[in-house]
Amino acid sequence: MNYSLIDTHCHLDIIEAQGQDISVSLEKSHAAGVKKIVQIGINFDRSLAAKRIAVETKAEIDISYTIGCHPADNIESPEVEEISNMIESCKDEKKFVGIGEIGLDYYHKKETKESQFKTFHHFMEMSVKHALPVVIHSRDAAEDTYQVLKDYKGKGFGVIHCFAYNAEYALKFVELGYYISFSGVVVFKNAQDIQEAARQIPLENVLIETDAPFLAPPPHRGKRNDSSNLPFILEKMFSLRGETNHKVEQAIYENSLKFIHRKAV
């Protein structure tokens, strides 16, 4: 079956760096029903690449981009300033849809907790100033991420990308006004907490993503991921939700459009 899909989080630049021509991924993804892709920035150079791909790529799929400062990169002040200046210069561009990845990562970089907090707050302030959605990376940092976002309740909005916590935290983030995005991890057999979160949150808060080239869902787990695998994630959501498959597909697509158009839940 051919679905209508939007990949809200993809790293085409990394796929490109790994030696696969972007056109190959885009052709496969278009055949699978993918209409739009959000190409994510993670540092200054990768954000420049994200913009280049979004602006210059000629394809059937429409590509948007974000500008980000990944918490696991331990990015120093001069680059934070470069990233901030890029956001300022691109904030009115149609293809620029948000700030991220930003957030907290205690799995890779717990020792940089203090600087991560400072950088996270900095970019949250920018998002509020310009009414831009944020793409939140949070790994092994659920409570601290929640507490930071709580400071901006009613002002900050966006998505918790590649959600990796339980239903309790999913509902807490929803209460703050965030979309929850599920990656191929939701298809993994041992991902019961994430699956329960996908069952419990309101359908209007659900997004899906690949995080390609990472986290390919079964039956392609362990291989390079791309947006063409998005149907496996959608079909898992069908099995977890109580609504009809058509309603789930339609709602996730409409939610994704709202996110791309910088609209809150």
Image: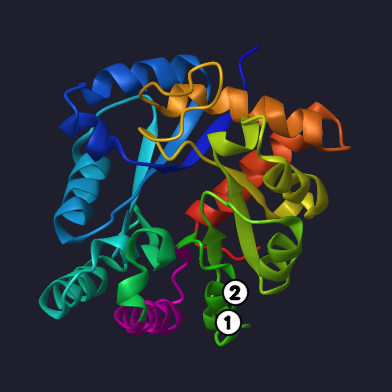
SS for callout 1: helix
Q: Is residue 220 above or below residue 199?
A: above
User: Which residue is outermost to the right?
Assistant: 242
User: Which residue is outermost to the bottom?
Assistant: 151
Q: Is residue 217 above or below residue 201?
A: above
In this rendering, the count of numbered labels is: 2
Q: Is residue 210 visible?
A: yes
Find residue 147 and name its label. 1
- Residue on which the image places disc 2: 143
Q: Name the foreground residue: 153 vs 193.
A: 193
Q: Give percent across and percent down for residue 90.
A: 25, 65
Magenta stretch encompasses residue 138: no
**Magenta stretch secondary structure, dominant:** helix
Tell me which amino acid carries mark 2.
Glu
- Left or right, 90 with respect to 193, comes to left
Which residue sits at x=74%, y=51%? 197
Q: Give percent across and percent down for residue 26.
A: 34, 23
Tell me which amino acid carries mark 1.
Gln
Region of the chain picked out in magenta, as a range: 114-136
Which residue sits at x=31%, y=26%? 59
Q: Name the foreground residue: 123 vs 139.
A: 139
